[in-house]
Image (tube, rainbow, N blue to C red):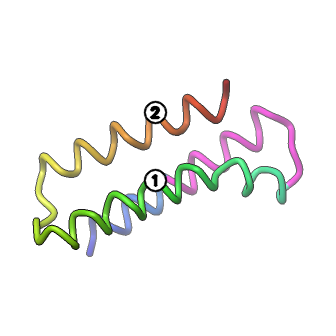
Amino acid sequence: MIIAGLLFAALGVIAACMIAKLGLCLCHGMISLLPSILSLISSLAMLAFTGHCLNIFSLLALVLVLGICVNYTFF
């Protein structure tokens, strides 16, 4: 479960950066983080639904999904 903790820590850092960059209040910052959280949850749910374990390749895919979501949030 260390990996899940690191993912949540990354989300916290991304949320702090978004709030600082966009100059939004805390509520708007959490709303802007919602697509990232939903995509990570749905990706992990699909991994669990299909019976795949969490390995290095799926973690790299999760990082890619998180990067794409952050990119869509800024633009």
Q: Is residue 28 left or right of residue 60?
A: right
Q: Is residue 60 magenta?
A: no
Where residue 9 appears, as percent x and y from the top left, is 47, 59
Q: Quadrant of residue 64?
A: top left
Where residue 24 appears, as percent x and y from the top left, is 86, 43
Between the residue at mark 1 and the residue at mark 2, the CA separation in whole angstroms equals: 10 Å
Q: Residues within 10 Å of mark 2 (few under 14, many from 20)?
A: few
- Provide the residue designation for mark 1: 39
Q: Quadrant of residue 60?
A: top left
Boundaries of the magenta span? 11-25
The residue drawn where x is 27% and y is 70% is 2
Which image quarter holds the C terminus? top right
- Give the structural element (helix, strand or loop) at label 2: helix
Where residue 49 appears, as percent x and y from the top left, is 22, 72
Q: Is residue 19 magenta?
A: yes
Q: Quadrant of residue 72?
A: top right
**Do the numbered discs 1 and 2 sit on residues whose CB atoms are within 8 Å?**
yes
The residue drawn where x is 41% and y is 57% is 40
The disc placed on residue 21 is none
The residue drawn where x is 83% and y is 52% is 28
Pick whichever, 74 or 48, lies toward us. Answer: 48
- Provide the residue designation for mark 2: 68
Q: Amino acid at mark 2?
A: Ile
Q: Is residue 31 left or right of residue 53?
A: right
Pick whichever, 35 or 21, lies toward us. Answer: 35
The residue drawn where x is 15% and y is 67% is 50
Establish if 63 lies above or below 41: above
Q: Is residue 43 left or right of residue 72?
A: left
Q: Amino acid at mark 1?
A: Ser
Of callouts 1 and 2, the N-terminal one: 1
Q: Main secondary structure of the magenta part?
A: helix
